[in-house]
Amino acid sequence: ARIDPLARNKPLSGDFRLSGLDLSVGRPFAPMVERLAGQLNGSGQITGTLLAPQVNGNLTLSNGEVSGAELPISLSDLSLRAQIAGEQVQLGGEWKSGPVGQGRLSGQIGWAQGLAVELQLQGQRLPVTVEPYANLEVAPDLKIHMIGEKLAVTGKVLVPKGKITVRELPPSTVKVSDDTVIVGHQTEQGKAPMAVAMDIDVEVGQDKLAFSGFGLTANLLGRVHIGDNLDTRGELSLADGRYRAYGQRLTIRRARLLFAGPIDQPYLDIEAIRQTDDVIAGIRLSGSAEQPTTQVFSEPAMSQEQALSYLVLGRPLGNTGEDNNMLAEAALGLGLAGSAGITGSLASSLGIEDFQLDTQGSGDNTSVVASGKLTERLSLRYGVGVFEPANTIALRYLLSKKVYLEAASGIASSLDIFYKRDF
């Protein structure tokens, strides 16, 4: 490169040539990427001035690979072509993902009057992994447009098949408040986030998208439109569903997730039933997903006790103590689920983290158990018997990730060392 420092505009001239530049040298700067490979070749000329350089030439990336366990998608056989003309670059490329997935990228990027981006992303049968919840097959057809600080994403995303598995969350799970400040993760004040305009249609379940979690197994299907600020409109339904509650496998008669606002606040409309002869008994979940309401119902209509008896026992309510205990346990579980939000907030204000309120045991041994963390290593559990005057209290201290010490006091006292191993 050559530059004239005496001239007013600092004229610039020169050329560049790349031959076999190995991209793997950049892997240490991308901690989430476990494998980064590819060869970069190209050549061109440099003209213009120091403040407004003009580049004309081309760059080619071949045999590219980007993969890592923390990445939702892996790219292989990546090839990318960039034709540079002055103050803009024309892009075109394709890649493979998994055994049959293919993707394409095309468009242009300019920087003459600020950054301007026009890209189109297309793909078929791309495997996407969201650890530890989902393994999906995705077919995007998106257009990305950006001028200055305004970004717009439009198009369609198909999720025809896959599997979503969600582990059971504690009843006290709550969303962090918007005004929460995490020490060490503060962002710069006064800098507004980039405005994103979205117009995306998401269609799921054209083939089979299986869901399993919270005692529910079903197939998801439906359509949701995502607008600005992740505002959503649409409906997802659950087909061929089964729900496990109180030792029973209930049939999903109706199950819908209704979106009419923020994407993380859908509304529930779910009925799980059990049919015994001519009587249908079931559970109805409705309202916001953050604070749903639970109702036991029956057809024909009857008292809540009889409806719950048909739901749990499959027959009318008897006079035996065992029947009464089983129904009391089921009713207690419903009541605790409804009060989880209040008890969780109270425990949080007292400095107790991961607070849980649930039932344990069965029959005469049923108890209400409250547990939570006092510190990162020390947790407390307290149980109260429902039918027997037996209270227990236990302190657990975490020695390592796999070994913990527990001291318990109740009908009998104990001090134990536990070793835990997950498979």
Image: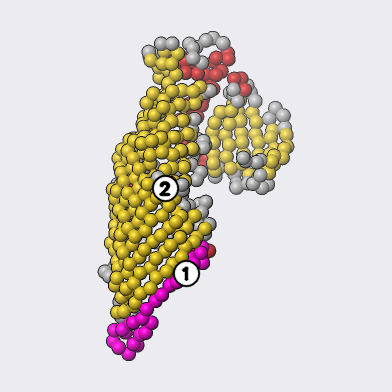
Q: Nearer the viewer, residue 270 or 216?
A: 216
Is the C terminus in the top left, top right, bottom left or bottom right quadrant? top right
Q: Is residue 248 above or below residue 197?
A: above
For residue 421, side relative to residue 119 (left or right): right
Q: Is residue 337 magenta?
A: no
Q: Amino acid at mark 2?
A: Gly
Callout 1 secondary element: strand
Residue occupying image coordinates x 64% and y 28%: 391
Residue occupying image coordinates x 43% and y 16%: 275
Residue that numbered label 2 is attached to: 101
Alpha carbon separation for disc pair 1 and 2? 27 Å
Q: Nearer the viewer, residue 320 or 72?
A: 72
Circle 2 residues within 10 Å: few <14, some 14–19, many ≥20: some
Circle 1 residues within 10 Å: few <14, some 14–19, many ≥20: few
Residue extent of the magenta highlight: 1-27
Is any atom of residue 232 visible in this view?
Answer: no
Is the N terminus in the top left, top right, bottom left or bottom right quadrant? bottom left
Q: Is residue 22 above or below residue 203?
A: below
Q: Amino acid at mark 1?
A: Leu
Q: Nearer the viewer, residue 74 or 233?
A: 74
The percent coordinates of residue 261 (x first, y second) are 32, 41
For residue 147, side relative to residue 270 (left or right): left
The answer to which of marks 1 and 2 sits earlier in the sequence is: 1
Residue that numbered label 1 is attached to: 21
Residue occupying image coordinates x 47% and y 69%: 21
